[in-house]
Amino acid sequence: MKHPMTKAAALALVIAPVLGAGVVSGATASAATPSHVTEVMKILTTGKLAGSGEQPKITNSAWTVHKGQTVTVKIISYDDGAAPLMGKYMKYTSVMGTLNGKEVAGGKTVSNVSDINVSHTFTITGLGFNMPIPVAPTGKSIVVTASFIAKKTGTFTWNCFAPCGTGTVGMNGAMKTTGWMTGKVKVS
């Protein structure tokens, strides 16, 4: 099912470290002081994917953090279209892998988002991290934040598991295309 959209929408993902002082983007850390990075990603729903039409699109779909860093993910969503989770994806209605098992969505601390109110997810399965992103109020935005500690090194795929792509169940097109609704997180 195609992700219904009533207007052009965007999510801005801000990956902001919480430990220490200073912000460094694209720099190499010294052995004594891990670098702290801020990465900004936008999910635009007006992107045109060849053969799939209008699809959610991400800019800056790959970013790097350091093992042991506490990372706060801040998502500003203007997406007022729902993409309800079904079947094996229902588990992604729950917040997972955060410091306290919760996220702050629209100023309220929550541990899950109802399946019919999910617009996207930001999920790094290899790190056990999941943020369900609720539908934004029409014409407004919703801010969602959660923090996690990068506990192991490697390159991990992140995905949106809300069916906001193409195909009979909405899991094709943008959902399977790097830089659209999937990307990489490197923990060094």
Image (cartoon, rainbow, N blue to C red):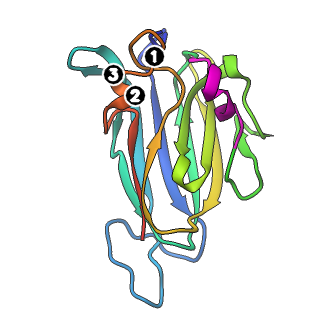
Secondary element under disc 2, as helix, strand or loop, is helix
Q: Is residue 48 left or right of residue 186?
A: left
Q: What residue is at 58 percent from the left and 68 percent from the top?
A: 151
Classify mark 1: residues with Cα within 10 Å, few (<14), some (14-19) or many (20+): some
Label 1 to label 3, Cα distance in Å? 8 Å
Classify mark 3: residues with Cα within 10 Å, few (<14), some (14-19) or many (20+): many
Do residues under tags 3 and 2 come within 8 Å of each other at their CB atoms? Answer: yes
The magenta stretch spans residue 76: no
Q: What residue is at 61 percent from the left and 51 percent from the top?
A: 128
Q: Which mark is residue 79?
A: none
Q: Position of residue 115 (x, y in %)?
A: 69, 21
Do residues under tags 1 and 2 come within 8 Å of each other at their CB atoms? Answer: yes
Residue range highlighted in magenta: 83-95
Q: Which residue is mark 1?
A: 170
Do residues under tags 1 and 3 come within 8 Å of each other at their CB atoms? Answer: no
Tell me the kind of residue under disc 3.
Gly
Tell me the kind of residue under disc 2.
Met
Residue 66 vertical placement versus 102 (above, below): below
Residue furthest to the front in view is 88
Residue 57 seen from this side: no
Tell me the kind of residue under disc 1.
Gly
Q: Which mark is residue 175?
A: 2
Q: In the rendered image, which quarter is residue 112 located in?
A: top right
Q: Position of residue 133 (x, y in %)?
A: 61, 32
Label 1 to label 2, Cα distance in Å? 8 Å
Q: Position of residue 44 (x, y in %)?
A: 38, 28
In the foreground, 99 or 77: 99
Q: Which mark is residue 173?
A: 3
